[in-house]
Amino acid sequence: QVQLVESGGGLVQAGESLRLSCAASGRIFSINRMGWYRQAPGKQRELVAVTTSGGSTNYADSVRGRFTISRDNAKNTVILQMNSLKPEDTAVYYCNADGRIDILRRFDSWGQGTQVTVSS
């Protein structure tokens, strides 16, 4: 009932930047956390960055200082600005959001994923 649509992936060279965006739509009462995860071939999905409705953020050690997550609560969107990209950042990036559909029911939704490829 809550859909997440991602955009902004692509192919870049090492050192360049990309900006990912994710918009949540559907039956939304409130959103708690919005964040980004990634999964490289042969590896498990891992947290990249997450932000809460209160504005706190958390980053994976591998991206801290290079990536910035931001959120527009009014538009139910989350942005991941990725700078100084490295080949090891290559992965499918997934948006995730959790919150409430109404005062009784929660949701935890995932986007379809967007490919980020960084060439050396």
Image (cartoon, rainbow, N blue to C red):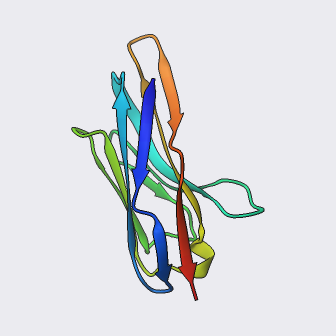
The N terminus, quarter of image: top left
Foreground of the two, 68 or 113: 113
Residue farthest to the bottom, as pictured: 120
Give percent across and percent down for residue 94. Answer: 53, 51
Q: Residue at x 43, y 39 (%)?
A: 4
72 versus 107 height, above or below: below
Give percent across and percent down for residue 71. Answer: 31, 49
Quadrant in the picture for residue 83: bottom left
Foreground of the two, 71 or 16: 16
37 versus 26 height, above or below: below
Give percent across and percent down for residue 118. Answer: 54, 78
Q: Is residue 8 visible?
A: yes
Q: Is residue 55 visible?
A: no
The C terminus, quarter of image: bottom right
Give percent across and percent down for residue 55. Answer: 32, 47
Foreground of the two, 96 or 117: 117
Q: Residue at x 49, y 75 (%)?
A: 11
Q: Residue at x 48, y 20 (%)?
A: 106
Q: Residue at x 45, y 10 (%)?
A: 104
Foreground of the two, 89 or 66: 89
20 displayed left or right of 95 = left
49 versus 105 height, above or below: below
Residue farthest to the right, as pictured: 42
